[in-house]
Image (spheres, helix red, strand yellow):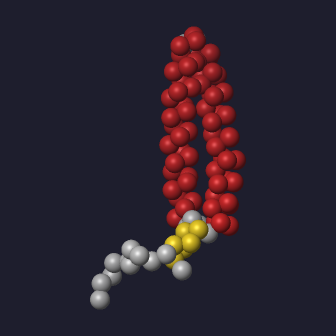
Amino acid sequence: MSNTPDLGQRRKINWLNLNTVLSAAILIGAEVFGAAYAGGWAVAMLFGFGDLGVISLRVLFFAAGLAVMISFIRQASRVEPFTSRR
């Protein structure tokens, strides 16, 4: 007997879990990327970095926001799996 799962086993999408996680991701993503956009401008203006500083900080904060969203989706899919074996 092997402990490896049968690769031919069918998986079914759990639409309720998928809908829940995607809805939360849209809400959290809007907040994270909105804060990154505004935060880049605010920090650049606070320190007088100019237009290039605004763009640079927005890109930096956007990348950090992207890392947050990837982490959120990965953790949420562990709590509420998108697929189930049937």
Instruction: Give the percent coordinates (x, y) of residue 66.
Output: 53, 40
**Viewer-closest of 81 and 34:** 81
Q: Which residue sits at x=51%, y=51%?
A: 71
For residue 46, above or below residue 78: above
**Viewer-closest of 31 and 13:** 13
- Count of numbered tags: 0
Residue 14 is at least partly visible in this image: yes
Seen from this angle, which residue lies furthest left?
Answer: 1
Instruction: Give the percent coordinates (x, y) of residue 58.
Output: 57, 26
Q: Residue 29 occupies which quadrant of the picture?
A: top right
Q: Which residue sits at x=63%, y=28%?
A: 37
Seen from this angle, which residue lies furthest bottom?
Answer: 1
For residue 58, above or below residue 34: above
With 38 as the anchor, is 9 left or right in this view?
left
Q: In which quarter of the image is the C terminus?
A: bottom right
Q: Which residue sits at x=58%, y=12%?
A: 51
Residue 79 is at least partly visible in this image: no
Q: In which quarter of the image is the N terminus?
A: bottom left
**Viewer-closest of 31 and 42:** 31
Instruction: Give the percent coordinates (x, y) of residue 44.
Output: 58, 18
For residue 22, above or below residue 29: below
Q: Which residue sits at x=55%, y=54%?
A: 73
With 31 as the anchor, is 43 left or right in this view?
left
**Viewer-closest of 49 and 19:** 19
Instruction: Give the percent coordinates (x, y) of residue 60.
Output: 50, 29
